[in-house]
């Protein structure tokens, strides 16, 4: 038995799992600010303080997942094309 079937089965399981995650929780924490909405900075004494608002997520701390973004784009194209 070759490794083709187990590799394909693993790929299907991972894809379905990611699709399920995108359906249940379409938003994830921002990678740059880790969900804070701002970057942490240190002052000269070494204490942490709030930095500037995150430019990537605009202070929300959340980002849309790639799979959900692709689903939304495909759904929009299909909806506009069938009208």
Image (cartoon, grey):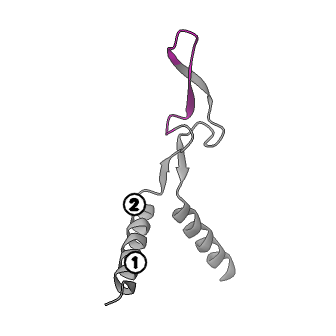
Q: Which residue, given by chain and number where applicable, does mark 1 sit on?
A: 12
Q: Residues within 10 Å of mark 2 (few under 14, many from 20)?
A: few
Give percent across and percent down for residue 61: 53, 40
Screen quadrant of the N terminus? bottom left
The residue range painted magenta reads 34-48
Decide: is 79 above or below 72: below
Does the image show residue 83?
no
Q: Please give left or right for residue 58 compared with residue 8 in the image.
A: right
> Residue placed at 39% from the left, 79% from the top?
7
User: Going by the picture, which residue comes out furthest to the left?
Assistant: 1
**Badge 2 or badge 1: first in the primary sequence:** 1
Give percent across and percent down for residue 39: 57, 30
What is the CA distance from the residue labelled 2 to the residue labelled 1?
Answer: 18 Å
> Residue placed at 53% from the left, 9% from the top?
45
Q: Main secondary structure of the magenta part?
A: loop
> Residue placed at 57% from the left, 14% from the top?
43
User: Going by the picture, which residue comes out furthest to the front?
Assistant: 2
Q: Quadrant of residue 44?
A: top right
Residue 68 drawn in magenta: no
Question: Helix, strand, or loop for circle 1?
Answer: helix
Tell which of 11 and 40 is nearer to you: 11
Q: Which residue, given by chain and number where applicable, does mark 2 sit on?
A: 24
């Amino acid at each position: 038995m070759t490794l083709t079937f187990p590799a394909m089965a693993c790929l299907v399981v991972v894809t379905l799992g990611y699709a399920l995650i995108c359906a249940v929780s379409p938003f994830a924490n921002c990678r740059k600010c880790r969900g804070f909405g701002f970057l942490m900075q240190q002052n000269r004494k070494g204490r942490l303080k709030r930095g500037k608002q995150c430019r990537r997520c605009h202070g929300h701390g959340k980002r849309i997942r790639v799979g959900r973004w692709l689903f939304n784009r495909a759904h929009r194209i299909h909806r506009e094309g069938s009208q």
